Amino acid sequence: MSAQTLLGRLALALGVFLIVSPAILFFLWMISLSVKFEVDNAAYPPVFWPEHFAWKNYGDVLSSNRFFTYFKNSLLVTGGATFLAMLVGVPAGYGIARMAAHKSAIVILIARITPGLSYLIPLFLLFQWLGLLGTLWPQIIIHLVVTVPIVIWIMIGYFETTPIELEEAARIDGATRWQVFRHVALPVAKPGLAVAFILAVIFSWNNFVFGIVLAGRETRTLPVAVYNMISFDQLSWGPLAAAALIVTLPVLLLTVFAQRQIVAGLTAGAVKGG
Amino acid sequence: MSTIVEQVSGAASEAAAPERALRPPSYWPFVVPALVTVLAVIIFPWLFTIWMSFQEWKVGSPTTFVGLSNYSRLPADPRFVESVGHTLSYTALSVLLPLVLGTFAAVVFHARFPGRGLLRALFIMPMMATPVAIALVWTMMFHPQLGILNYLLSLAGLPPQLWVFHPGTVIPSLVLVETWQWTPLVMLIVLGGIASLPTEPYESAQIDGASTWQMFRYITLPLIMPFLFIAAMIRAIDAIKSFDIIFAITQGGPGSASETINLYLYSVAFVYYDLGYASAIAVVFFALIVALTALLLWLRRRAQWNALGSDT
């Protein structure tokens, strides 16, 4: 190996280290905070690896009755909003792709650039008027603002690239449009379904702004519940960090195991747009 | 995430392909359920917001039509004017820093090295993690006495900072979080761009003895410009609307030093319940985002035109 390639490799290793370490160190520190007793979390200089692990931080969070209520709420809101978005968004993506109705995409563009808060004011009044505010429905419905555009968008992209010849052959054999969609187009677009589903789940799970306005005591999702913990236990960092980690863990695991789908979903448009 | 970009490309391919004449009407049933949903949760709120912006409406009292007076309140509202300034500086920094760092990261990730897949997954984690959860940990890290950041500064021999607890440093500190969080998205977009580049120019440049930096500066950078514009546009739209991070870390404070338009909008709507005025802010805010998007698109078109001009 010549001196120059060695130097190149060292530079690359340094570059990798520089760009990846902020993410890795952050999450390691998050884990460290979550397994320390207050004594260690308040120590200066900071303690990274404590002598005694405070596993009870996790126990405290998981054993509180409320946690499972909030977890269930998050599951229902994200599950409901994703399910409904797939139900209406996948056929819509198919229809738009086959009609080549690119103009309809302007609505999705508007949805993309509109601040979430501007949906909240009118929908908040509407939900109040309908008497839905004590239930999870307002959150499920307003999360559609996030999930529906994602699903439609990704599905348009996938259906545009699936071959139309197969569908035409099925049509000639007498299949209805619905049968063609169900039995020919949908199976081919399976990778797209996975991408749309994963991204819809993540962005709905992470959503915070809709919850702080629409959620009551009993209808909080996990991000809102964690935020509310700040005001109550400002000083007990351990349980707080443990709660934060529990809330975001499903998403982090999804990121590691479905990295390919996530990257494909987030960049498909950008790469084509160049 | 990628919708803007898709829209841009969609518009371009539409202009090129006149095959829309074949549009069969029977695909409509597929679209109708989504159309109803979009009308209910996207179009209706929009029309309602515009209508409300012409009303005086505080919760509990009847509404009255007040014409444009909600809009004329805006320039005379010092908190709003100040929030525009905060939003612009926050957005400018939150576009520039991730753009520079993300391009660097893309160049690094374009190289092949062991563990690249896993490291890339770790690298994109900040962008996928729940914003409130990470904001919480950043708040602890920013703590002036117990936070790890001041400890790290002391190791480097630098004086401690007040980070988000001082009006002068709160916006740069929040931008630090935003940059940490969103550099990965820029990296992914630019990486896609670099991966699509032809290899011939690099081969001939290498034969001519060009250095790595020269190859980046004179081959890679001009060719990935379109991707940088897209990344800048997406970043600008997301940064200007940034809410979770700012709200969870500072609530717009200290005082109102980090109050952006979005946070002020939240206060007016859901703390003061002045819904008519809040709607006017929402409309103006949206117009500002559209203007910013249009400006970036215009810059992009001009840059492309210039590139074409210099080629011939």
Image (tube, rainbow, N blue to C red):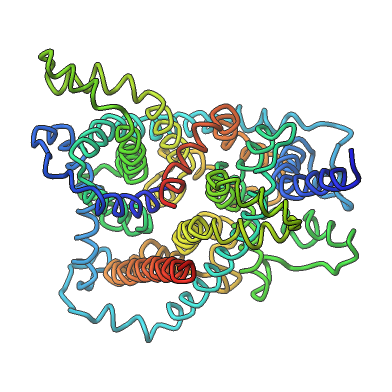
* Identity of the residue drawn at 59% across and 57% down: B178
Quadrant where the C terminus of chain B sits is bottom left
- A28 relative to B259 in the view: left or right: right
Can you give x and y, in whole percent of width and height, for residue B127 in the image? Answer: 57, 46
Classify residue B232 as left or right of residue B172.
left
Residue A218 is situated, as x and y percent measured from the top left of the image, at: 42, 38
A33 left or right of B201 in image: right
Residue A226 screen position, x and y as percent? 56, 43
Q: Is residue B276 left or right of residue B35?
A: right
Can you say whether B233 is above or below A162 in the image?
below
Asked if residue B191 shows in the view, the reply is: yes
Residue A228 can be seen, yes or no: no
Q: Compared with residue A269, is residue A196 higher up or lower down, i.e. above or below?
A: above
Identity of the residue furthest to the top in this view: A173
In the foreground, B264 or A10 = A10
Residue B125 placement (x, y as % from top left): 61, 41
Determine the residue positioned at 55% across, 46% down.
B198
- Specify the quadrant of the image occupied by residue B21: top left
Quadrant of the rendered image containing residue A163:
top left
Which residue is at 18% across, 16% downward? A170
